[in-house]
C-alpha cells in the first residue's frame, strides 16, 4: 500500500506493536555480498522485496525494516555484528520487543543441504552454524524456529570450510538458489501465521 506525498511515493509503515521477528544471518558489507554464508541475508531481502519493505534503518546493531506478514507486524532484522556475534543483535531486539524465541524466525545457511533445497525446523541445536550458536548461547534457548537454506558442501574434504562459506555462488547455482529463496519467503509467511507444520510439509526437502 503506497501513499502519494508531494509527487513522491512513501512506503506504508505498519503500526502497532511488533508481534513477530524474522532474522536473516550473514556478514555486512560489500566484501561479503553474494557469498554462501549470506544466504540468510538474501532470504530476508526476498521477503522484504515481496512485502514492499525496506531494511535500511539502523537499530539493535542491525539493519531493520517493518512489514505486515500474515496479519502480524513483523520486524525484519539483518545483524551488522558479523556472523559469529549474531546473538548480540537478536538478544537486544528480543528484549526490546519482549518476544519469546517461538516468535523469532531465523534464516540461515546450511552446508549439509544442496543449493536449491531448504529445511524447516521448529527448534534444535546450532548444527555447527556459528551465527545460530551465538543466538542460542546468548538468548539461552533452542526454541527458535528456523529455515535452513542449502549452500552445498565443500568440493572436497581438504577444502577450508571458512573459504568455502565465504565463496560466491556459481552462475549454474543462481537459478536453484533463487527458487530456494522463494520457498524460504513462502515458508516464512506461513510460519509467521502459525502454520509451521504446513510450511514443513510444503517446503522441506
Image: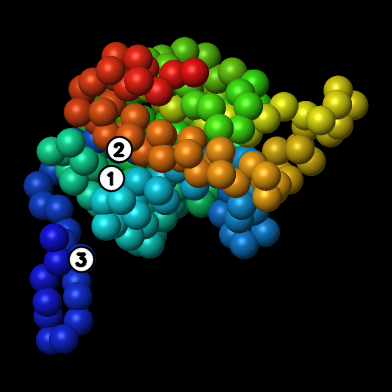
Q: Nearer the viewer, residue 176 or 27?
A: 176
In the image, what residue occupies the spot 26% across and 28% down?
Answer: 190
What is the quadrant of residue 167 in the picture? top right
Q: Residues within 10 Å of mark 1 (few under 14, many from 20)?
A: many
In the image, what residue occupies the spot 35% across and 46% down?
Answer: 47
Residue matched to label 3 = 11
Is residue 3 toward the left or the right of residue 67 in the image? left
The local secondary structure at tag 3 comes to strand
Residue matched to label 2 = 21
Give coordinates of residue 63: x percent, y percent. 41, 55
What is the quadrant of residue 204 in the picture? top left
Considering only vertical position in the picture, is 127 above or below 71?
Answer: above
Q: Are marks 1 and 3 in contact (CB under 8 Å)?
A: no
The local secondary structure at tag 1 comes to strand
Q: Earlier in the sequence, mark 2 or mark 3?
A: 3
Report the Cα–Cα distance between label 1 and label 2. Answer: 5 Å
The local secondary structure at tag 2 comes to strand
- Image depth: mark 2 or mark 3 in front: 3
Give coordinates of residue 172: x percent, y percent. 67, 44
Q: Which mark is residue 75?
A: 1
Q: Are marks 1 and 2 in contact (CB under 8 Å)?
A: yes
- Image depth: mark 1 or mark 3 in front: 3
Give coordinates of residue 181: x percent, y percent. 46, 40
In the image, what residue occupies the spot 16% across and 86% down?
Answer: 7
Is residue 129 toward the left or the right of residue 49 in the image? right
Amino acid at each position: 500500500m503506497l501513499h502519494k506525498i508531494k509527487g513522491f511515493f512513501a512506503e506504508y509503515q505498519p503500526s502497532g506493536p511488533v508481534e513477530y521477528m524474522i532474522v536473516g544471518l550473514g556478514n555486512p558489507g560489500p566484501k561479503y555480498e553474494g557469498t554462501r554464508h549470506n544466504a540468510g541475508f538474501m532470504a530476508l531481502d526476498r521477503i522484504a522485496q515481496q512485502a514492499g519493505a525496506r531494511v535500511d534503518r539502523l537499530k539493535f546493531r542491525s539493519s531493520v525494516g517493518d512489514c505486515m506478514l500474515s496479519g502480524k507486524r513483523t520486524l525484519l532484522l539483518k545483524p551488522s555484528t558479523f556472523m559469529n556475534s549474531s546473538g548480540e543483535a537478536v538478544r537486544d531486539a528480543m528484549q526490546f520487543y519482549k518476544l519469546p524465541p517461538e516468535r523469532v524466525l531465523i534464516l540461515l545457511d546450511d552446508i549439509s543441504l544442496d543449493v536449491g533445497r531448504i529445511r524447516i525446523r521448529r527448534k534444535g541445536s546450532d548444527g555447527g552454524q556459528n551465527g545460530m550458536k551465538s543466538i542460542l548461547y546468548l538468548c539461552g534457548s533452542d526454541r527458535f524456529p528456523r529455515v535452513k537454506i542449502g549452500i552445498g558442501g565443500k568440493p572436497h574434504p581438504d577444502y577450508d570450510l571458512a573459504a568455502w562459506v565465504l565463496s560466491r555462488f556459481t552462475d549454474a547455482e543462481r537459478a536453484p538458489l533463487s527458487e530456494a529463496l522463494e520457498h524460504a519467503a513462502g515458508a516464512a509467511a506461513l510460519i509467521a501465521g502459525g502454520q509451521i507444520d504446513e510450511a514443513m510439509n510444503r517446503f522441506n526437502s
